[in-house]
Structures are given as C-alpha cells and as structure tokens.
Image: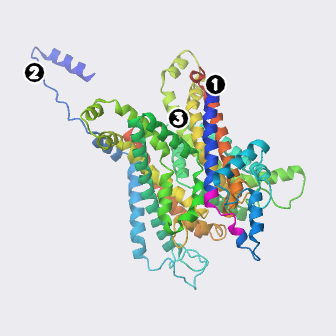
Amino acid sequence: MSIVEGASATLAAGPEPEPPSVVMARKPLSRGRLIWNRLAHTPRFWIGAVAMGTIVLWAVLGPVFYPIDAFSRDPLNMGMGPTQLHWFGTNNIGQDIYAQTLIGLQKSLVIGLIAGPLGTLIAAIVGSVAGYLGGIVDNVLVWVINLLLVLPSFILLVILSPLFEDLSWIFLTVFLAGFSWMIMAQVIRSQTRSLRGRDFVKAARYMGVPMPTILARHIIPNLASLLIIDATLGVVAMIMAETSLSYFGFGIRAPDVSLGTLLSEGTAAAVTRPWLFVFPAGVLIATLFAVSLIGDALRDAVDPTSGVNRD
Amino acid sequence: MVFYTLRRFVNYFILSAIATCLAYVVASLALDPAAKYYGRNPQPSAHVIENILNGLGVNPDVPVLVRLWNWILTLVTQGSLGDTVGGKSVVAEIVTRSGVSLQLLLLGSIIGAILGVVLGVWGAVKQYSLSDQTVTYSSYLVFATPTFVIGVLLMIGATMLNGIVGAQLITFTGSYSAGMTGSWWDLLVDRGVHLLLPTIALVLTGAASYSRYQRSVMLDVLASDYIRTARSKGRSRNSALVRHGVRVALIPMSTFFAYSFGTLVSGSIMLEIVFSFHGMGEFTLQAITQSDINAVAGSTLFLAVLVLFSSTLSEILYAALDPRVRN
C-alpha cells in the first residue's frame, strides 16, 4: 500500500526519478539466536526460570540460614503447627518440617537433574544408532524399545530394589533413567533416518568419517533442541516418579530423605495435621510447575507450530 | 480393516506375553518365597517347606525356565494362575479385586477423556479467552502434581468440608462402608460416595493431558481449508465445527489415548492405595512384600491384558474414525 502511494506521489511530484537503492538483507539469524529471541519474549519462560533458580538457591542455601537441624528433636514442640520457631511446624517426634523439606528437596532435585538428562542421553545414543545403521541393529533396538515400553517398570523396580539397598538413591536414579528413554528414542530414530540421507551426512560418510563421529558431529547437534526439551521435561517426569515411588515405600529409603518420603510420612496425619503434608507438597508442586513452564516455553520456542502446548 | 486391526492385536499380544514371562522370571529370581517360612517360630521342617513351595510351583531348586513353562502350561490348559501364598486361587483373587479397580479406572478414564475433549475443543474455539487461559494454566498445575498428592489434597479438602458442614458428607476410606446394611440403593449411594474423590483425582489428571492435546489438534483443524469449505457451502458454524472439525481432531486423540492409558492405570493404582481400596494395586503390593511369585506374575498379566485391550481398542477407534486406514 505505502509503496504504491509513494510511487504515485513521486510521479505526481515531477519527472525526477529517485536513484534505485539497493536493499541490504539483514544477516540471517542463527538458529540458536532465533530460539533465544523467542524464549526471551515468552513470559512463561521467565516465570519458570526465575522460580526454578530461586528454588535451587533456596535448596542449597536454605539450611545454612536456618538454625535448626533436620533430624534433631525439639521435645517442647512436638506435633506443633507452623510457628516463628518452626516455620513449617514439627512432626510428632519434634523434628522440624522446614529443615526436612529442604533436605528432601535437595535429594529430589539431584535425582531429577541427573536422571532426566541421563534418560535423554540414552535416548540420543540408542535412537541415533538405530536410525543411522538401520537393518538388523535397527530391528533389534526397536524391538527392545517396544519390549521395555510394555514391561511393568514399577513392578520391576519394586522387585529389584532390595538387591540394591546399599546403593540407595544412585540405583534409583539409574533405574528411573533406564526406563524413561524409550519414547524419545523412537523420535530420535525417525529423525535420524531422515537426516541420514542428507548431503552433509553422506559427504562425511564418503570421506570415511567413522560412525560415532558422524553421530556426534552431524546427527546429534541437529537434534539438539529436541534433546534439550526432552531433558527438561524429563526432570519433571523423574522427580514425579521418584516421589511417587518413595511415597509408596519403594524409592528412597531411610536414612535418606526425599520429598516423597516426607509426603509419605505426612500422609497418615494429613487430615489432622495438614502442615506435615501440605508444605512439602507445595514445594514439590512449585518445583515441578517451574520446570514444566521452562520446558514448554522451550518447546514453543524451538517449534512454534508444535502440537501439545501451542498458544 | 479387520486384517489391520488383527495384525496390530497380534503384535501387542506377543509383546504383552513376553513382558509377562519376563516379569515372572525376574520375580522368580529376585523374590525368596522360602524366607518367610524360615522366619517362623517354630520353624517348619525343611521337608514341609519344600512341599509348600512345590505345591505353589515356586521351589527355587527347580530351574526358572521349567517353572515358567509349568506356569504357562497350567495357564493354557487349566486357565489357572496358581495359588497365592495364602492358599487362595490367584484367578479368583484377581476377579474379585479387579472389579474394584476397573470401576475406578473406567469411570475415571471415560469421564476424563470426555471432559478433556470438551475442554480442548472449547479452548481451541475460544482461543486466548479468559476461560481458555484458565483451563491452560490449571492443566499445567495438574501436570505438575503427582496423582497421589492430588488424592491426599482432596482428602484434606473433604475433611475440611465435612468439618464446615458438621456432618460426614464425604467418606473416603475404602470402597464402601464396612458392615453397612440397608437397601441396595443405600449401598449403591455409599459406594458412589466412596468413589467420588478418587474418581475426581483420576478425571483431573486425565482431563489435563487430553485437553492440552485436543486443543492443539483442534487448532490445526480449525485453520484448515475444509472447515472454510464447509462454512462456505452453507453449514452453520457449530455444525461445521462438530461434523467436520471435532471428528477429524479425534483421530490423533485415539492414538494418544492408547499411549496415555498406561499412565492412567498407574495413576489409578496409586489412588487405590491412597484411598485404601482393596483393588489390584493393593494386591500387587502385597504380593511383592510377601514374596508371592504367582500373585506378582498374575497381576503383571492383568496389567498387560489391560494395556493390550486399550491399545487394540484405540486401533479400532482409529480405523473407525479414519477411512484412510481401513484399506
């Protein structure tokens, strides 16, 4: 519209033609830059990131600024509601719920932050190898993936957990990661299959670059955004799995404390002394909410047309 | 279409059979059914223990694969899954307990799916409206809450409500009031009241994920040409949305339903335990804590059959909704 008006205006003004100007194209944005720009304009991302940063800081520094130890008992304040002395109240043997919540939060965060990315790593390796090699390897790996998908992982974990009692939460972390990668591996596999036929991959192959290098240098970086999203949302899934298992007595065991064991202890009295349950639950929900906001914002930034969480 | 569905069914069938066998093997290797008898006082003689273990078919001296083979054989020939350590038939236990579990699971998944679809379509049609935003953020919040937490929070809420009303309005322990007598109507109402909270929890989790997915699929559909065509040939907006929009948007939903069914099952098992229902969840946990191999294998089989049925059902639904698959 404005161009036409401008043209007719110059025509009306007189015979002086404007010198043709060369329109300089802007330097194209790199993909990372583009994603970052989109992220920076998503309020959800900032809410999630700030909340998550605060929670992590709180989990690390909280105990330093709180005088009461998580396991010491206060015989004068047993089963008390929140007071100035005990911010989240105490349980029936006088242990401080605030201090315990922080310790539990630390453990749950560590498990989530390790198991989530670990699951993604397994998915990336298995998926890209299966997709890249094809043939028998592919068939076998796909079969394994399908099998793991139908295996009742909960029952397996519960059965196997006594065997690994000494390793406690490390075993749990590895196990959770070991049962969380299958769907993502399928996605990576199909993406790799399409990347495999692209010229830059072919060129690398014909130059004799070995397979692991091709995967690490050409395939995985092209799927990086997918993997980052998966790792982020994996943290949510893993924390949730850990708390649920611990809640039913099969995940984290004493003397370790996680949000799940705290919730499990708080349930019995949840109705009469709600602070035993409500505070750890609130912290858990806030953490998961923050991480999932980040994950969703990431997904939208990477693929604005993407399905599940489009706005 | 029959061939297609059959092929998918066979695929799922083989997978669940393998899963069950593997679970049997793992359970046999990891659980020690004899330990419980050695711990008794007075300790039964080795001979007696051996007899008991042989009777259950769980004697650790017999190779695992032989035991697995016997287990499969009795399952196929007699339709029996062996006995529990308590001496009851596993099949009978599963039959009585699965009623409780299926009640909750079916109610929760069906209501959840319908509510999710309705909310999702509504959100897509009224995109960015206040109600859409509310539903979106509430579903994020539900996503971020483990199922058992929802259950316990509902309990706390119900207790507070009971306190405010001053009467036992909502009861939530067990699936019925023990020792209650009255007409069948009273008993039915009693069961309904007990089911209320776990069903709400299950519906919430289901509806949260279905509504997100349905909304995004529906947004894609709304932007497509055939909706415009339907409008331009004179269909009203609502009719175009329902006849041409929702139907198409339901196709990917049927696959999503199959994927999410496993999550729903584990959610409902957790809720059963939280609300102390005597269902399959409790049965499975007891089986594991009592080192009851037959019961563990039986409940794994039950879960596998559930997943098998839901996957096949969703394939049939898919084929029914999408004519392209039928040929």
The image's mark for residue B3 is: 1
Name which residue lies at 61% across and 60% down: B30
Write the start and end of the magenta stretch as one range: B28-36
Q: Position of residue B69 (x, y in %)?
A: 68, 47
- Tell me the distance, in whole angstroms, between the alpha carbons under discs 2 and 3: 50 Å
| Secondary structure found at label 1 | helix
Q: Which residue is mark 3?
A: B124
Report if residue A304 is visible in the image: no
In whole angstroms, how far apart are the C-alphas of marks 3 and 1?
Answer: 36 Å
Image position, residue B274 (x, y; %)? 67, 60
The dot on residue B110 is none
As drawn, A79 above or below B221: below
Give the amino acid type for the residue marked by disc 1 in the picture: Phe
Indicate left or right for B99 with B321 as reference.
right
Q: Tell me the amino acid under the disc marked 2.
A: Pro
Q: Who's the residue at 10% across and 21% down the image?
A: A19
Residue occupying the point 39% across, 41% down: A129
Residue A163 spot, x, y in % from top left = 56, 64
Could you say which disc has been placed on residue A19 in the image?
2
Horizontal side of B48 relative to A190 (left or right) equals right
Kind of residue at badge 3: Ala
